Image: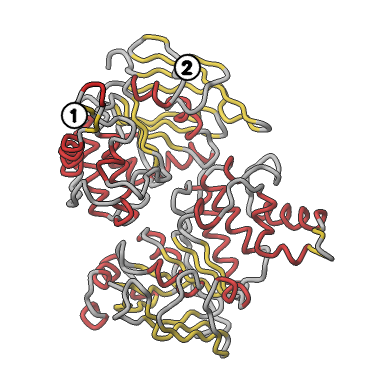
Amino acid sequence: MGLPLLQMSSISKRFPGVVALDNVDFEVYPGEIVALAGENGAGKSTLMNILGGIHQPDSGLLRIEGEELVIQSVADAIQKGIGFIHQELNVLDNLDIAENVFLGREPVWAGPLRLIDRQQIHAQADLCLERLGLNVSSRTPVKDLSIAQQQMVEIAKALSMNARILIMDEPTSCLTTTESERLFEVVRELRERGVSIIYITHRLGEISNLADRVVVLRDGRNAGTLAGDQISHDLIVKLMVGRDLERFHSHSASSFETTGYFRVLNLRTTRYPEHSTSFDVSQGEILGLAGLVGAGRSEVAQAIFGVDPALGATFVLGGQRINIKSPRDAIGHGIYLISEDRRRAGLVLEMSIRENITLPSLQDYASAGWINRVAERRVAQEVSSKLNIKAPSIELKAANLSGGNQQKVVLAKWLSLDPKVLIFDEPTRGIDVGAKAEIYQLMRKLADSGVAIIMISSDMEEILGESDRVAVMHEGAITGILEHSQCSEEAVMRLAVGESINEVA
């Protein structure tokens, strides 16, 4: 294969109380797609943040084309031909697409006046969007785009840099199947042009589909490498977790304590005011809510939780009609929402694990205006241990946790209360294979204890594997509800594109 384009040798990095990387070796050859796999907290992000100029290693060497170098900043990494597409969106919604794509790198004219050449940035941005199959103008304000489209803008930004090494961290986490397929085409085109791709994903099917090699990290160390025909779901999982992992989805018939325990009748959201939605979920049931991106599933969840109050709806809990006009109302009735955007809507990143967990129920630890820190720490520690949150202390800031552990803190926040209805919006987005299994087990235990669970997911395997029933949405309305025995990928997709339940049956 010749000489590697990139060599990272014996890379080590420590943070307070944590050894993030311990003598890790990693290399990439020209025109190669290397998947970087591992559980949350395995060190993938830290390794890539060192390559991207965000962190400096404590020890180790980095070479590009055999030349030893130090990458001191993000700008330094970009100058050396390293592009980084982060999992969390870094777009500015007050700017248009082209302004985001070329932010900080705007072409200028008029000599010392240094005026931005807007015609050029829009022309070049339009070419990037065309390559990605995104049929919108580069003059479109980012605030008018969906989350999936904003993710494509991030990818367009990296493509515009003409990077030799392109790091993609969970690039399809917000994309539809069609958008993902187009991205895979672009990745293969870049490989043919000699660009090296470092591809980080928890979707193991994508690794099998794209990667030439897979490098697996576990607990900050090299766990192994697979190449070519060696790449398989089971072998990747075994390297990631250090053991054979039983099949995630072991659905068994559930016995519901109270059928129709939580009922949503004639719900209309601000996004689809002309369509109403009705469904119910029983105690002990996991009701999957499926549909294509933009079908209105998250809007239904936000209306139930009172974030964006419904234009009209009737809510019935345990046979009693209830009013929900705000999150405070929902929380008062034991209805909790675990948002798909954990960083913006689920956590206060600058607060500690303990503070995040006890935040919704802080009054329970207060007396005469003083917080009982001993009781607060005890509860936070118990819930953290129950969910296996990987952190040296519950006093660690949430911002310093891996994505999967951040998701567990969001779960812990509500589990420290007494949930009656839990709404999971994309519960395992960006979460590794081991943490997924833990969350599925937790959801089933909650259901078995009598909690009514509504699970919104774009992962078809998750919907089919975890749901007792599946309600499918299209343009703000439910097109059909499938019993578990009726569920199949074809049936769900036909309902998702607008066919009626009678047509599917």
Location of the N terminus by quadrant is: top left
Residue at x 34%, y 82% (from the top left corner):
276
Left or right of 103? Residue 37 is right
Location of residue 259 with respect to 194 vertically, above or below:
below
The answer, for residue 436, to whether it is visible in the render is no
> What label does residue 381 carry, if any?
none
Amino acid type, residue under disc 2 in the picture: Ser
* Residue 469 picture quarter: bottom left
Element carrying mark 1: helix
Instruction: From the image, tell me which residue sits under label 2.
Output: 9
Residue at x 80%, y 58% (from the top left corner):
371
Residue at x 40%, y 17% (from the top left corner):
7
On the image, the x and y values in percent for residue 139 come to 21, 48
How many callouts does the rendering have? 2
Instruction: From the image, tell me which residue sits under label 1.
Output: 192
Q: Nearer the viewer, residue 32 or 352?
A: 352
